[in-house]
Amino acid sequence: MPKNTHVVPRPTGWGVITEGASRAGVVTQTQAEAIAIARQLSINRGSEMLVHGENGRIRARNSYGNDPTRSKG
């Protein structure tokens, strides 16, 4: 199962963290740069990207993996 990628605030900018890692793999100056990196990593891995706001809460999520098929309901 692919590990999700998180964009999180850091004291010196924005970090891109793979789920389960203890520290950021990449730290950028802007959130937009971090999102671009995380998006590409998520596409390559077929995983989900979660973007956190300055308060640490998830503000956006995008799935680049195998989404389950929708059932008629």
Image: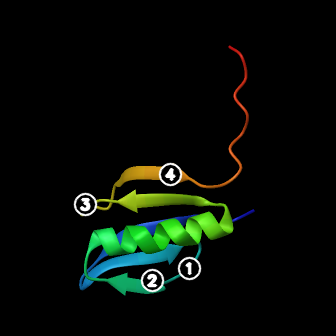
Residue 29 seen in this snapshot: yes
Mark 3 Cα-neighbour bin, 10 Å: few <14, some 14–19, many ≥20: few
Report the amino acid beneath label 1. Answer: Ala
Where residue 63 appears, x then y in whole percent?
A: 57, 51
Q: Of label 2 and label 4, which has the lower sequence position?
A: 2
Pick the residue in front: 40 or 51: 40
Q: Which residue is mark 3?
A: 55
Residue at figure coordinates x 53%, y 70% from the top left? 40
Q: Which residue is mark 4?
A: 62
How many marks the image carries: the answer is 4
Where residue 24 appears, x then y in whole percent?
A: 45, 83
Residue at figure coordinates x 34%, y 74% from the top left? 33
Mark 2 Cα-neighbour bin, 10 Å: few <14, some 14–19, many ≥20: some
Report the amino acid beneath label 3. Answer: Asn
Q: Nearer the viewer, mark 1 or mark 4?
A: 4
Q: Which residue is mark 1?
A: 21
Q: Of label 4 and label 3, which has the lower sequence position?
A: 3
Residue at figure coordinates x 60%, y 55% from the top left? 64
Pick the residue in front: 32 or 55: 32
Under circle 3, the secondary element is loop
Under circle 4, the secondary element is strand
Say whether marks 2 and 1 touch (CB < 8 Å): yes
Say whether marks 3 and 2 touch (CB < 8 Å): no
Q: Which residue is mark 2?
A: 24
Pick the residue in front: 32 or 25: 32
Say whether marks 2 and 4 touch (CB < 8 Å): no
